[in-house]
Image: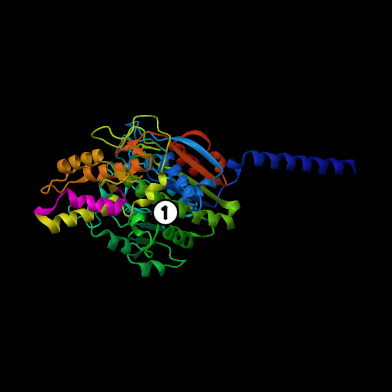
Amino acid sequence: MKKLFDGILSAFLILGVSSLFAAGNLSQNVRPKYVFLFVGDGMGLAQIELADEYARLSGMERIFINDIDYCAVTRTSSASSFITDSAASATAFACGAKTKNGRLGVDSDGGRLESCAVAALESGRKVGIVTTVTMNHATPAGFYAHNKKRSNYYEIALDMLESNVNYFAGEGIASADDKKSPAYRGDIYSLLEKSGYKVCQDEDSFNGLKAGTDKAVVSYKSGLSIDRCGKGGGISLADVTRKAIELLDSDKGFFLMVEGGKIDSMCHVNDAASALWETFDFDKAIKVAFDFMKEHGDETLIVITADHETGGLVLGSGSGFSPLAKSGSDKSDYSAQILNLGNQKCSQSEFAKRLAKIKKDKGPDFSFGDAKVLIEECFGMKFSSGEKPGPMSISAADEKLLKDCFDKYFKPQDENSNRFQIYVSRMMAHKAGLSFSTTGHSALPSITWAKGVGADNFRGRIENTDISKILKNLLR
Ligand SMILES: [Zn+2]
């Protein structure tokens, strides 16, 4: 009897101790069946905080990223620079090795690297790679391509064929029929079709994609969220994410990478309002994963990260907006008026398109006056006409700076008007109490957020390469 009791006691102790052990080492003993990796390209902490504060002030639902359990400060530097580009960073968090800027899936010596997507495929999981930019852009390509040059778009797209990735979605494939490429073998879409992919290039065929389709490529026009606002229709990042879950769900689970690729490009041109709406768009795709997690909480991991910060976005405008001359206040200024971003009705690129059209229509009669009318229409800023200045007013002194910039950079014979547009956007950001310090990337560490099975691996200060290492470990 005592023997039996001892046996039960020791079994109980062993069970008790081992379950304690398991709880304490959750990250090593429990593996997620479903893994989501969200990458906000250029989405630094300032971009996230701007979106959350805008949501809070305007009475919208707060951003879903808030609903996360763990986070890690993540160094983004590449092998060649403190400031990474998107190719080196994608290689780092996809493959787990630092490389030189511009390289994809190869190390600094050109050696081939394998990504966590490969680990996922080897484990029997299905794999999806979706983005708002082209499918062979740096971030998505980091998971399947191997090239010394991120701009070798055609060759990178050829790597899609060998990838065994089950589902690709993005805003087309860059240089898909580049006959000048030395590696040219035909149009990429036809090659994908020949190798067994169902290729969808319109909304109907996208909607028609059903579970059971083993390999699919979706080319969709994601456009810009700010320009889609109120128009409805079209396919969004949330839609392609939802479709991914439908197509990839299987006995062994899946790995899905989702990129919000245009937060970066909007911050490159210092267009704060457009970057804000891209962040909301990305956040909506994250919500799709959170909803999935409600049903599969004990077998799902959601990781959200950024490859780097873009624009050197500052949530404060004390030093003014002007790249040419000091303007605004040099005093310590603690006021923020970020809801003023809501006055912007379209993206900077839409503004530029419309301005170029007016210029074309008017020919030699085109003048700064035309730009002024369009600035008021697109950005909601008001040029002073003697009345009391409001929060969106452009003072006479600032109008002069703007006109100087127009005269210098928007000459009728010169199509390249980029700097004028950026200048208008910087002025707009200033109206919201924000400022940009660069049109490039910054070396600010990213935040990697995690929730679910294995999320506790993401804490403290990590390297971007650790994201891949942790994911590979959990996926194998
Ligand atoms: Zn960038």
**Relative to the observer, which residue lies in front, 465 or 356?**
356
Residue 57 image point, x, y percent: 48, 48
**Relative to the observer, which residue lies in front, 422 or 343?**
343
Q: Is residue 78 magenta?
A: no
* Position above or below: 268 against 222: above
Residue 326 image point, x, y percent: 27, 32
Residue sticking out furthest to the top: 331
Secondary structure beneath label 1 = helix
Residue that appears at 30% across and 48% down: 381
Residue 258 image point, x, y percent: 42, 51
Q: Is residue 369 magenta?
A: yes
**Relative to the observer, which residue lies in front, 127 or 357?**
357
Residue that carries the numbered disc 1 in the rendered image: 281
Residue sticking out furthest to the right: 1
Q: Which residues are magenta?
A: 364-381
- Asked if ligand 1 lies within 8 A of label 1, the reply is no
Looking at the rendered image, the quarter that the N terminus falls into is: top right
Asked if residue 104 shows in the view, the reply is no
Residue that appears at 54% across and 39% down: 457
